[in-house]
Image (cartoon, helix red, strand yellow):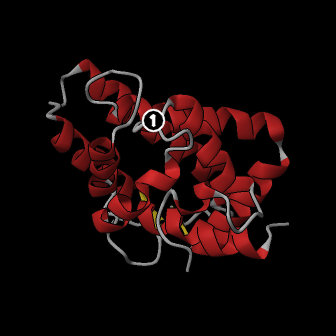
């Protein structure tokens, strides 16, 4: 069962995916996120980077739909989304696969200069592409830089996402990775 803290922070991720803010996550939302990321990265639809990102992000979506869209109406409600993550967290093998994909996807897409760290500007770029509040990204970046070296490595990102999804510690920095806790 999800804890109260998880129930308070997972809606941030839901809202990030609900790009048109209609209360559902639909393929249209996923396509908008892909398009915005491509625009921010300067990718054309024929670019290999675009094709990889598109395939990975759409694959994440289709996997989520297969497991979470219980009424098969081609969209996810917040309740279905929470149930999906509750089940995912309880299944370590599936969790690891999804978390690794999510971490690598974010990192490889937004580490624009390929220096092995997400700078503050790159983290802010992620926020803009995902339709999140860039001012909040600016406020929390220092807290998310776990070792204080002015960059978030893939290992740090993995810890932050794990904290976001699994931690019940209200002070864990990863809790705010996708925005403030409601």
- Percent position of residue 32, x then y: 28, 54
Up-down: is 179 above or below 147? below
Up-down: is 111 above or below 39? above
Give the quarter of the figure containing the N terminus.
bottom right
Towards the viewer: 105 or 150: 150
Dot 1 alpha-carbon crowd within 10 angstroms: few under 14, some 14 to 19, many 20 or more: few
Towards the viewer: 130 or 178: 178
Give the quarter of the figure containing the C terminus.
bottom right
Towards the viewer: 88 or 123: 123
- Percent position of residue 85, x then y: 70, 57
- Percent position of residue 74, x then y: 51, 61
- Residue depicted at x 37% and y 59%: 137
Q: Is residue 56 visible?
A: no
Towards the viewer: 95 or 134: 134
Relative to residue 61, is residue 141 drawn left or right?
Answer: left
- Residue depicted at x 51% and y 55%: 143
The residue singled out by tag 1 in the image is 149
- Residue depicted at x 58% and y 52%: 65
Q: In which image quadrant can residue 15 be found?
A: bottom left
Q: Is residue 50 visible?
A: yes
Relative to residue 26, is residue 127 drawn left or right?
Answer: left
- Residue depicted at x 46% and y 78%: 23
- Percent position of residue 147, x then y: 55, 38
Q: Secondary structure at mark 1?
A: loop
Q: How many marks?
A: 1
């Amino acid at each position: 069962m999800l804890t109260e803290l998880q129930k308070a922070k997972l809606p941030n991720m839901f809202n990030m995916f609900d790009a048109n803010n209609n209360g559902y996550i639909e393929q249209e939302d996923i396509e908008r996120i892909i398009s915005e990321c491509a625009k921010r990265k300067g990718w054309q639809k024929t670019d290999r980077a675009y094709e990889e990102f598109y395939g990975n992000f759409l694959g994440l979506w289709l996997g989520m739909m297969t497991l979470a869209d219980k009424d098969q109406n081609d969209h996810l409600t917040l309740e279905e989304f929470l149930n999906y993550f509750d089940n995912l967290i309880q299944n370590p093998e599936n969790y690891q696969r999804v978390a690794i994909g999510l971490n690598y996807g974010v990192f490889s897409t937004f580490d624009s200069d390929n220096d092995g760290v997400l700078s503050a500007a790159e983290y802010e770029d992620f926020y803009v592409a995902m339709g999140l509040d860039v001012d909040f990204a600016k406020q929390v970046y220092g807290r998310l830089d776990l070792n204080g070296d002015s960059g978030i490595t893939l290992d740090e990102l993995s810890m932050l996402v794990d904290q976001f999804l699994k931690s019940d510690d209200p002070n864990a920095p990863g809790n705010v990775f996708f925005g403030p806790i409601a």
